[in-house]
């Protein structure tokens, strides 16, 4: 099956920032987490995919179609949530249903109201009176009720309480049970992605640093804590990044099993996506 989303050699240059040779593939039935620090290029990449900005160079294909040539057709099959963008706050879900069924050919009114009932969202209440968790759930079920094949989400769980986040993550996993569906989600909350993502793409300073299955990252990468003398014994080729603290070194490695066989250093901590990001961004190269 063709990729749901394919990006090849995407470049976009601003006066003080540049996206450089971005390559991304999103297959069917998966959740891809897009991570990176503020200003790394996540939102610029998403806006490029949606043709909200003009790119300088590269190819973007969605459902194996050119994203510009077939933009109108493609957007029938995409659900989008961008940070701080939705319907006017005076509208209620009943109003939203009336608008959406005239905008989307496959808008599913029954599905929409079933979701409202499931998540206990009031149908006739203005969305300005919704809590942040209620509003995000409304955004997501509105996107899903248009029957898209691809969801593109920018910080969908930001600022939500654990219960609301859990409900939204469950909804994501339900969505990709259909192998023709995928989610491309940008998030600062890496713990959420550790729960639901199949793949992780890490962007820093406009360049993709890592692009891997989540399980491979979390199984093979590790954080080694060691003394200065043990650090000096480690082959430089086995160190991805390191950070020197007052009493120890923290060393990022990407082949835990090989490291354990090679060195008599046993203080190896299970890694998190936050650890990987932090050491790649703040850590030093061992040159």
Image: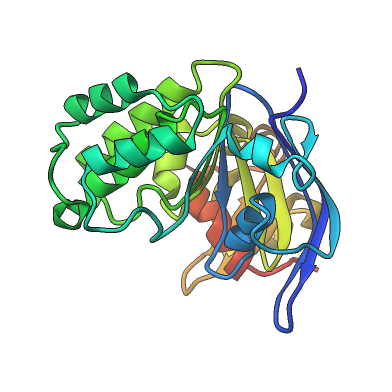
Q: Nearer the viewer, residue 233 or 154?
A: 154
Residue sitting at x 67%, y 35%: 73
- Residue 12 place in picture, x, y as percent: 77, 66
- Estimate the x, y position of residue 266 in percent, counting from the top left: 54, 42
Quadrant of the rendered image containing residue 3 = top right
Q: State the image coordinates of residue 278 (x, y, percent, origin top left).
A: 54, 62
Residue 37 screen position, x and y as percent:
54, 64
User: What residue appears at the point 20 percent right and 24 percent down from the top-left corner?
Assistant: 118
User: Can you tell which quarter of the image residue 19 is in?
Assistant: bottom right
Considering the image in quadrants, where does the N terminus appear? top right
Where, quadrant-wise, is the C terminus in this rendering?
Answer: bottom right
Q: Nearer the viewer, residue 119 or 71?
A: 71
Q: Nearer the viewer, residue 30 or 224?
A: 30
Q: Quadrant of residue 200?
A: top right
Q: Is residue 125 left or right of residue 134?
A: left
Residue 230 in view here: no
Q: Residue furthest front?
A: 102
- Single out the residue that lies furthest toward the bottom: 15
Q: Is residue 29 left or right of residue 108?
A: right
Q: Is residue 287 visible?
A: yes
Q: Residue at x 14, y 55 (%)?
A: 129
Q: How is the image coloured?
A: rainbow
Query: What's the residue at 33%, 24% (across, down)?
Result: 109
Work out whether 28 lies above or below 239.
above
- Is 142 rendered above or below residue 282? above
Of 257 and 68, the residue lying toward us: 68
């Amino acid at each position: 099956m063709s990729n749901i989303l394919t990006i090849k050699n995407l470049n976009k240059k601003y006066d003080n920032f540049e996206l450089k040779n971005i390559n991304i593939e999103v297959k069917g039935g998966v959740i891809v987490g897009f991570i990176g620090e503020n200003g790394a290029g996540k939102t610029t990449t998403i806006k490029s995919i949606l043709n909200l900005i003009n790119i300088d160079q590269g190819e973007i294909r969605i459902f194996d179609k050119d994203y510009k040539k077939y933009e109108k057709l493609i957007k029938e099959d995409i659900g989008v949530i961008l940070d701080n963008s939705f319907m006017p706050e005076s509208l209620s879900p009943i109003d939203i249903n009336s608008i959406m069924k005239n905008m989307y050919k496959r808008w599913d009114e029954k599905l929409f109201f079933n979701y409202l009932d499931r998540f206990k969202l009031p149908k006739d209440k203005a969305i300005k009176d919704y809590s942040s968790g209620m509003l995000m759930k409304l955004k997501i079920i509105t996107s899903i009720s248009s029957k898209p094949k691809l969801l593109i989400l920018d910080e969908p769980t930001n600022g939500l309480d654990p219960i609301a986040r859990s409900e939204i993550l469950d909804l994501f996993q339900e969505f990709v049970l259909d192998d023709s569906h995928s989610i491309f989600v940008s998030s600062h909350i890496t713990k959420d992605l550790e729960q639901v993502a199949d793949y992780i793409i890490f962007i820093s300073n406009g360049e993709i640093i890592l692009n891997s299955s989540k399980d491979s990252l979390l199984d093979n990468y590790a954080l080694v804590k060691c003394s200065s003398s043990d650090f000096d014994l480690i082959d430089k080729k086995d160190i991805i990044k390191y950070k020197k603290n007052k009493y120890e070194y923290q060393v990022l490695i990407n082949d835990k099993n090989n490291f354990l066989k090679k060195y008599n250093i046993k203080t190896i901590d299970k890694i998190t996506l936050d650890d990987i990001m932090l050491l790649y961004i703040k850590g030093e190269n061992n040159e």
